[in-house]
Image (cartoon, grey):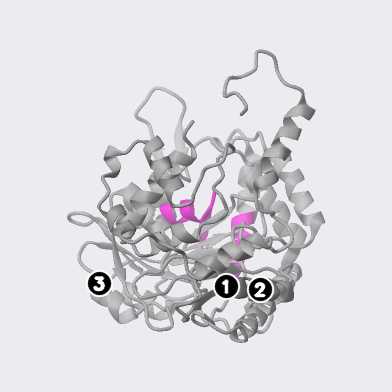
Amino acid sequence: MPSDRLPETGRPAGELLAELARLRDADLPVRGGQVTAYVYDTGREAVHALAASAFQEMLEVNCLDPTAFPSIVALERQVVGAVADRLGGGSGIFTSGGTESIMLAVKAARDRRSVDGRPEIVVPTTAHPAFHKAAHYLGAKVVQVPVDSSFRADPVAVAGAITARTVLVVASAPSYPQGVMDPVPEIAAVAASAGIPCHVDACVGGWVLPWLREAGRDVPPFDLSVPGVTSLSCDLHKYGYAPKGASVVLFADESLRRCAYFASAEWPGYTVINAGVQSSKSAGPLGAAWATLNAVGARGYRELASTSMRVAERLVEGVAEIPGLRVLGEPVVPLVAVASDDPELDVFVVADEARARGWFFQPQLSYQGIPPNLHFTLTGVSDVEALLGALSDAVKAARVAGPPDVPAGLADALAGLDLDGLDDAGFGELLRSVGVDLSESGAAAPSMATVNAILDVLPPATREALLIRFLSVLYAR
């Protein structure tokens, strides 16, 4: 195992790069379409190479002070302007990702609307956990409302959840888990009638939906052109295909955007004014996003969106031909969730079998009546026939293997476990007892069906506590 101690003299560049390559051997591939989550591939190598060059060009430029580096102002104006042009106007902020964009939207809403007591945000159960994270950091409370049988938020339930402490109402376009669109106009109207801001989380859909509409598909209204929508988040490192992390949060009016800013004069040092959560940060992602947008162009995005959606539709057709599987909801973007109604076919085992065949299908745990399922984020490079073949083979193997063997009483024991009384070493032993061993490089063994099956029967609070301990062990020295 490499030493944590710095070498007395610097190591050669070739040696360091070789070690990086070795460390990446266990990583999932970022090209080729066999990883159906986390990564987005245009299939246009020249675009990715250009983005890397632009990233490097801006790498050492610090976004902390736009007066010192006016290039970041010019680039951000262009990037935000391009997004606003397709998503109903407004003014915005370039951020590091959807979580930061959502954090700023929640902060702006909280600071705009003063309430007595703890501020509340009303979100569908399918809303991204970034809203829970933002509420946790900003001292707000999340009020969840149910979704209907098609996994869409219920406007009547939203209206019923609004109180005098509500500072923000949320809709998703689409929600990540099933790729379905909430009824944005109806939810925005409910919020507007109560005088409350409405944020549309279009992090995953914001840069694919407008191109699908331009390509002739029926896309429901969802952006800042919808009356009552006051802010919107759109990730460019998803279907914008820019390197991580690149996102934009748009505000319908400038005064709300200013509520997202932070300034401090309570010290004798340099002037502190931040548009985002971070202070010092590299302009690399901004330069790379700008280069990617301009290299792909409108025609390129229309083509990529259309191709990706055709892949998703073919996957939906193919899943219907595999016994025991079904698609959840009717996805409006290239996101597909696949569940099983067969008690002898466990989707977590399917994921493990697919991983053994070189494919990554993202497991999603059950929640409030939504069954456990596998999530597929699809792009135009996805070889859908190969994917369907791998899925079919994994299903056949999972039937032979059967559901995970979860020891009787283990879930109850974990739910009652005193985690505070268990150090990281002890928790590591617990992980090994259920088949998860952390390798020398810190990566978990690929067999996760048993762990996911255990997590699936635990309440969310217990899941969260266990996952935090897992992360602690993962990074333990």
**Mark 1 is on which residue type?**
Val
Q: Using the numbered discs, state the Cα–Cα distance from disc 1 to disc 2 in whole angstroms.
A: 11 Å
Q: Looking at the picture, how far across and down is residue 466, in whole percent?
A: 37, 50
Mark 1 or mark 2: which comes first in sequence? 2
Q: Using the numbered discs, state the Cα–Cα distance from disc 3 to disc 2 in whole angstroms.
A: 45 Å
Q: Which mark is in front, 1 or 2?
A: 1
Q: Are marks 1 and 2 in contact (CB under 8 Å)?
A: no
| Residue named by callout 2 | 393
Picture residue at 60% right of the left edge, 38% below the top = 282
Mark 3 or mark 2: which comes first in sequence? 3
Q: Is residue 455 magenta?
A: no
Mark 1 or mark 3: which comes first in sequence? 3
Q: Using the numbered discs, state the Cα–Cα distance from disc 1 to disc 3 in whole angstroms.
A: 46 Å
**Mark 3 is on which residue type?**
Ala
Q: Which mark is in front, 3 or 2?
A: 2
Residue 89 seen by the camera: no
Instruction: Say what secondary structure mark 1 lies in.
Output: helix
Q: Is residue 308 above or below residue 114?
A: below
Q: Looking at the picture, how far across and down is residue 464, in whole percent?
A: 36, 53
**Mark 2 is on which residue type?**
Asp
Q: Nearer the viewer, residue 278 or 320?
A: 320
Q: Which mark is in front, 1 or 3?
A: 1
Q: Looking at the picture, how far across and down is residue 320, in whole percent?
A: 59, 86
Quarter holding the N terminus is: top right
Q: Are marks 3 and 2 in contact (CB under 8 Å)?
A: no
Disc assigned to residue 161: 3
| Residue named by callout 1 | 400
Q: Which residues are magenta?
A: 79-103
